[in-house]
Each structure stands twice: as structure tokens, then as C-alpha cells.
Image (cartoon, helix red, strand yellow):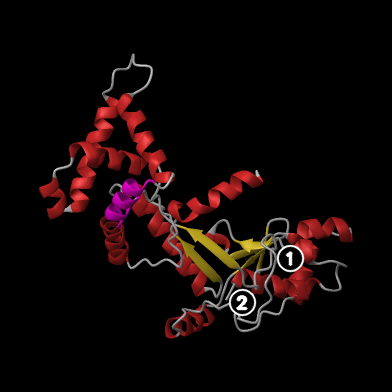
Amino acid sequence: MNIVKRLQQTFHAALAGLVDDPAPYVAMVKPAGDPRYGDYQANCAMSLAKVLKRKPLGVAQQIEERLNLGDWLQPPEIAGPGFINLRLRDDWLARQLGSVVADERLGVERRGALAPRVPPDSRSDSATRTFIIDYSSPNVAKPMHVGHLRSTIIGDALARLLRFLGHTVITDNHLGDWGTQFGILLYGYKHYLNRDAFEADPLRELARLYLHVRGLMSGADEEAAVDPVAEACRQETAKLHAGDPENVRLWQLFMPSCLEEINRIYRRLDVHFDHTHGESFYNPMLPEVVRDL
């Protein structure tokens, strides 16, 4: 239940007949800024007084008389020049809380499957929509860090909340499984591999190779026109993208260990994806995109 909306509906009925369009004045019913004066507050009497050419206090009293309090509102209090202070009845509030506790959805309504779908820029509160949530999107050639953890948790929280409300959610984890990071691994594997370590724990050895080669790149002669290690890694990357059989074979050798490591983390977090296409998935499409551009 949205109490503000219910209050605004109550005021809309009370203002009908006093003014042609109650909507702008109904919007002035809001949670109270200071709980000492009530739970909610309506400040519409002052604005209405100018239209009706009457004193705000008299307008507030007339609104009070026309309000249907039902079984949920205490008698309003009028303060100052015409503020209408409102409080909920304790017994009504207790009943609502009791029903919420007994409800497996805690009183949150699900948008119906038959509710109309709307354009993305629509402001409708009742319609269902389709959302795409893009998660942490890590580079699989190296361990994830706390930033990946944070965006994974935020993404999954959004996905669960939207699904709980009845929306359609498509989850995507766009993996960095192509490009320069694999050029670094390919160069490191070919020049600095500890084969026994790789056979014992492929991921740990790949992580060591990645850090080792990056260290060589950062320590290169700053006066050199081209960092030779970085250039060699770029060449390995270019060969991979061009379909070099040896580099593709090594990439396929690296990928299972890399994927298992990040999937182990996702399983522990109980996070699941509808799509996990990496950059490599789009590689065959790139020439046509370039031609189109």
C-alpha cells in the first residue's frame, strides 16, 4: 500500500467541487517534515485560497469537513495559516502491519503479467517493462578485484528487485576474454612459462605470468621510442585476432581455467546470468561492422 497515494485520493475526493482541477493541490499532500506535527501534511489550502479568494484558514476548515477519514485517519489538525496535519490511526496501522507480516510478499504488489508494456520513457507505475542488467564484466585473464564484487552485488540486487516486482529482466556479463590481456599472457607463456607450475595450477601460473610481463613493460627503457615488450604483446594480440592457429590453440587452453575461477566466485555469491558472451563472441562480426561504418 502506498499511503501517500491513498491520502491524495482522499483529498482528491474532498476537493472535487471546490476547484475544477484538484490534481495540482492533491500533489501538495506529502509526508510531514517534522513528526511532532503529524505523519503527513497537506499545504494546499494556501494555494487554493488565492483561487477561491478566501482566507486560507477557512479553506482548510472546509477541506477538513469534506475529508472522509474512514477507519484509518485521526481527525486532522489545522495549524498556522492553514496547514492540515494528518496522523494515521494506531489500530489501523497495526492491522496493516499484521497483514504484511503474514504475506509472503510483505505487502508488495506484483505488476500483473497482463499489464500493458510501455515505452522506456513512460512514467506509468503499473506497467511491466523489460530491463537489461550488465554486471561486473571482468577481464578473465586475471583475478577479479573488489570493484567486480561491488558491481556484481549491485547488479544482482537490481535484478532480484525488478523480478520481484514482476518485470522481465535479462542479465548479462560481458566478459573480457579477448584483446591485449591475452596478448600479455601469450607472450608470457611463450617466454617465461614454468611448465610444472602450469600443470599443477594453471590459473596461478597465468596470474604470475601476467604480473611478470606487466612488470617488464612498466620497467622498460623510458627513452626507447617503443616499449619492446609492449610491442611484442601487441603483436601476439594481433596474431590471435587474425586467427593464428598457435595463438588460438593457447587461448583455448587458457580459457577453461580462467572461466572456472570467475564462475567459482559467482557460484559462491549465487549469481547467475542469462548471457555471458565475451568480446571473442563478436570477433567474427567486426569486419562487417567496419564495412558498414
Query: What predominant SS class does the magenta segment belong to?
Result: helix
Q: Is residue 224 above or below residue 235?
A: above
Magenta stretch: includes residue 245: yes
| Residue under the point 14% across and 43% down | 194
Magenta residues (range): 244-255
The answer to which of marks 1 and 2 sits earlier in the sequence is: 1
Disc 2 residue crowd, few under 14, some 14–19, many 20+, Cα 10 Å: some
Spatial CA distance of label 1 from label 2 is: 17 Å
Q: Quadrant of the C terminus?
A: top right
Q: Nearer the viewer, residue 171 or 68?
A: 171
The residue singled out by tag 1 in the image is 26
In the image, taking residue 20 as reference, residue 170 lies left or right, namely left
Between disc 1 and disc 2, the foreground one is: 1
The answer to whether residue 57 shows anywhere in this view is no
The residue singled out by tag 2 in the image is 73
Q: Nearer the viewer, residue 214 or 150?
A: 214
Where is residue 89 drawn, in percent x and y? 55, 77
The answer to whether residue 56 shows anywhere in this view is yes
In the image, taking residue 97 as reference, residue 45 lies left or right, namely right
| Residue under the point 28% across and 59% down | 256
